[in-house]
Amino acid sequence: MAPLVASLNTNGLWYLARGSGLVLLGLLSLNLVLGIAIQGGWHPPGWPRFVVQGLHRNLALLAVILLVIHVVTIELDPFVPVGWWAVLVPFVSPYRPLWLGLGTLSLDLLLAVVATSLLRGRLRPSWWRLTHWLGYLSWPLAVVHSLGTGTDTRWTLVFVYEMACVGLVVAAVLFRLGRAVSTAPGWRAGLILATAAAPVAVLAWAASGPLQSGWAIRAGTPVTAVASTGATGSGTGGSSAAPGSPFVARFTGTMVESGGGTLATLTISGSVPLGSLQVVLTGQPSSGGELSNASGTASYRPAGTAITYQGPIVNLQRSLVGMSLQAPGGPVVPAQLVLNPSSTATRVVGELSFGTSGSAASPSSGDDG
Ligand code: HEM
């Protein structure tokens, strides 16, 4: 594990943390559907029952591996202050405590289901069945955690994917309830109604919460993770949920040099907790390894939006890149990236000021943890 972690820069960890969460949600949803099918005695034609059961068990183990990746990468990534206790103890994280705590509860329930399944032979069948039913509860908790904690919820593709997971499971439960003729009609009708109403309730909640501007702050993101110093204008120090608001935030990324001869290109790409930035500089390489007569462009994309601010580099000093950015049809926004002297090509660290004149003309070298 150590060489893998060492070879990933913090952006890699951040993408892996979010990506593994999304794959995990899909996997849990699929596996829940398989579990419902097995309980209902249904399996695809030509598939023996034991094959479906084996698939169900192996998908659950794969989900546990992904869950470990999700949690470990979240913990190792410096963007979000979560704390190791928060992995098993719900609601103790300083980062979005309620929504993250639901993920922790989901993990606890999932672990109980997996552990009792592995020990099934030694447990009373009623105990095993009871804990297995908890698997049903683990899934909605994971869904609400994903929508409430995820940075990418406002990204249409991710939201549609998450709602497709909900739709898949709801359809399977409705199908199962439709065939549960031995259940009392009153109960059955109530359960069908509640199941059908669930996606509507999730959509209504998402529309009034995670999809709204200002959710990052309302969800309990510590201001230190949203913006590092007191920016003006938004009253909150800036937020990914309010694109265009001024902020000052910690930047991490990488630097790649290409070309050579008379013209070389330096590309700095990375992200702040609020979005991603790319700076492309072109100039003549000097003997000291610097670019002279450099000019370039920059683009900044706030997280969870389809907006891209673009514009020219207007100021270039040793560790300072001044930009003039503009979203289509919007006002010109000054931005400034101040690079930390401890930056290396594989790990560029600094501070991005967006919409302000910048808080740190001279970067602090101790801020790269
Ligand atoms: C079965 C349990 C879990 C599932 C299915 C799950 C799934 C997800 C998903 C789908 C996302 C959204 C990713 C995105 O929007 O890009 C997410 C985000 C997150 N999860 Fe989990 N998660 C689980 C458990 C946990 C646990 C136990 C922790 C505690 C360490 C945790 C911490 C986080 C954090 C901090 C984020 C926010 C990342 C961001 O801002 O995008 N998750 N999770």
Image (spheres, rainbow, N blue to C red):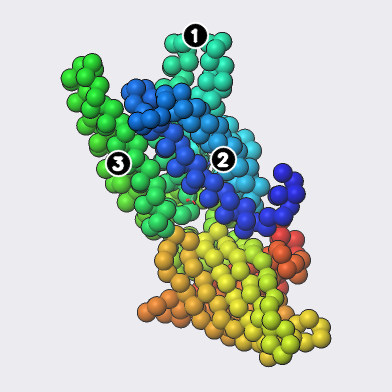
Q: CA distance from mark 3 to mark 1?
A: 35 Å
**Vertical relation: 3 (above or below) 100:** below
Q: CA distance from mark 2 to mark 1?
A: 29 Å
Question: Which class describes the residues within 10 Å of circle 1: few (<14), some (14-19), or many (20+)?
Answer: few
Instruction: Identify the residue under disc 1.
Output: 124
**Residue 81 location (% of width, % of height):** 60, 48
Work out which quarter of the rendered image holds the C terminus and state it: bottom right
Q: Residue at x 34, y 40 (%)?
A: 168
Question: Which class describes the residues within 10 Å of circle 2: few (<14), some (14-19), or many (20+)?
Answer: many
Q: Looking at the picture, which amino acid does disc 3 mark? A: Pro
Instruction: Identify the residue under disc 3.
Output: 199
Residue 98 seen from this side: no
Instruction: Identify the residue under disc 2.
Output: 66
Which quarter of the picture shows residue 179?
Answer: top left
Q: Mark 3 or mark 1, which is nearer to you?
A: 1
**Vertical relation: 86 (above or below) 152:** above
319 on left or right of 118? right
State the SS at label 1: loop
Q: Looking at the picture, which amino acid does disc 1 mark? A: Arg
Question: Which class describes the residues within 10 Å of circle 3: few (<14), some (14-19), or many (20+)?
Answer: some
Q: Residue at x 59, y 37 (%)?
A: 65
**Vertical relation: 49 (above or below) 347:** above
309 on left or right of 41? right
**Residue 253 location (% of width, % of height):** 64, 64
Q: Residue at x 49, y 8 (%)?
A: 124
